[in-house]
Image (cartoon, rainbow, N blue to C red):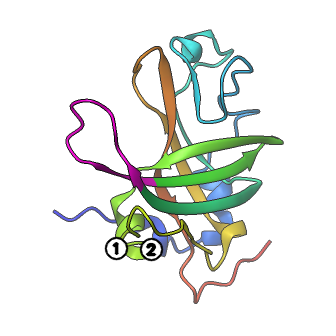
Amino acid sequence: MRRSNSLLCFPFWNRFDQVLADKPEQLWSDPSTTSRRVKEGFPRKMAKPASLYLIEPEKIESISFWSESNSFPGAPSPVRKKRVLKIRYANVSHECDIDDPVFSNKYYPRFPSVNQAAVEIELTRPKDTFVCVSLTGAYHGHHYKIAAAFFEPQPSYEILR
């Protein structure tokens, strides 16, 4: 079965945020680390522990992808493909690796080579786009932020707010 974001055709898109979206006071903000990760165990220390949210970002600051050299010993490939979403939520910037294959196939089926510049993606309606954000399991003492899925309105939908 092919994975799809079937909610893209949600018949009441103008109420998507009221029906399905989470509205946490904040996402994972750990002042002791960077905007793309939190320290291992951080979710358990939250007032309301959570590692997955479907949110409407205040702003999608950027979506970019590029290739870079991978010089880590034992790396499976000499090239690492990077996909990064930068969002603002509750007045805090967050950086998430993109892990949505449907979004990837739609916007960047071909990656630039290592010597080419990063490619920036412009969504048609970024203010009406929802993102499923998550934390990875612990890896080298940190949980990393990922964008697991994007939900964009169909171009023909009128947003009534």
Q: Residue 9, relative to residue 36: is it above or below? A: below
Residue 12 lies in what quarter of the image? Answer: bottom right
Residue placed under numbered mark 2 in the picture? 107
Q: Residue 97, relative to residue 14: is it above or below? A: above
Location of the N terminus by quadrant is bottom left
Kind of residue at disc 1:
Arg
Kind of residue at disc 2:
Tyr
Secondary structure type for disc 1: loop
Give the number of the mark in front: 1 or 2.
1
Q: In this view, does 76 lie to the left or right of 20?
A: left
Determine the main secondary structure of the stretch shown in magenta.
loop
Q: In this view, does 80 lie to the left or right of 41?
A: left
Between 16 and 120, the residue placed more toward the observer is 120
Q: What stretch is highlighted in magenta?
A: 68-82
* Residue at 24%, 37% in the rendered image: 75
Q: Looking at this rendering, what residue extends furthest in the right direction? A: 91
Density class for disc 2 (Cα within 10 Å; few <14, some 14-19, many ≥20) is some
Location of the C terminus by quadrant is bottom right
Residue 32 lies in what quarter of the image? Answer: top right
- Decide whether residue 35 is among the magenta residues: no
Between 85 and 79, the residue placed more toward the observer is 79
Marks 1 & 2, CB-CB < 8 Å contact: no
Numbered label attached to residue 110: 1
Q: Residue 20, relative to residue 64: is it above or below? A: above
